[in-house]
């Protein structure tokens, strides 16, 4: 498959988009863990959730 004279631009664009998506996935995973830990610490400190669910109910 020939991409023509714009091959380097196309490949670079795809690699850049893939890198950004990967960074976003990692960022979201780290933030999810951080939020879950913060919620667990708040519940351990006696702060109750209005929904009545605990942090362990969240999957």
Image (cartoon, helix red, strand yellow):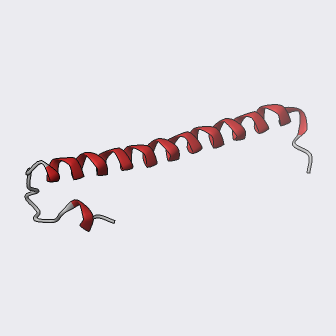
Q: As rendered, which of 9 and 29 lies closer to the eye?
A: 29
Relative vertical location of residue 4 with respect to residue 53 in this rendering, above or below: above
Q: As rendered, which of 10 and 20 lies closer to the eye?
A: 20
Q: In this view, does 5 lie to the left or right of 43?
A: right
Place of residue 6 in the rendered image (x, y in percent of width and height, measured from the top left): 83, 33
Place of residue 40 in the rendered image (x, y in percent of width and height, measured from the top left): 23, 52
Place of residue 34 in the rendered image (x, y in percent of width and height, measured from the top left): 34, 44
- Residue at x 25% of width, y 45% of height: 38
- Residue at x 71% of width, y 41% of height: 14
Q: Is residue 29 left or right of residue 11?
A: left
Within the image, what quadrant is residue 3 found in? top right
Q: Could you tell me which quadrant the C terminus lies in?
A: bottom left
Within the image, what quadrant is residue 54 found in? bottom left
Relative vertical location of residue 47 with respect to residue 53 in this rendering, above or below: above
Q: As rendered, which of 49 and 13 lies closer to the eye?
A: 49
- Residue at x 83% of width, y 32% of height: 8
- Residue at x 30% of width, y 46% of height: 35
Place of residue 32 in the rendered image (x, y in percent of width and height, measured from the top left): 37, 49
Q: Is residue 30 left or right of residue 50?
A: right
Relative vertical location of residue 41 with respect to residue 57 in this rendering, above or below: above
Q: As rendered, which of 58 and 8 lies closer to the eye?
A: 58
In the picture as drawn, the residue positioned furthest to the front comes out as 44
Q: In this view, does 39 lie to the left or right of 51?
A: right
Within the image, what quadrant is residue 9 found in? top right
């Amino acid at each position: 498959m020939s991409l023509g004279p714009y091959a380097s631009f196309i490949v670079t664009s795809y690699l850049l988009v893939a890198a950004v998506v990967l960074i976003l996935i990692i960022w979201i995973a780290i933030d999810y863990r951080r939020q879950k830990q913060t919620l667990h610490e708040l519940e351990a400190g006696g702060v109750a959730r209005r929904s009545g669910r605990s942090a362990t109910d969240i999957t």
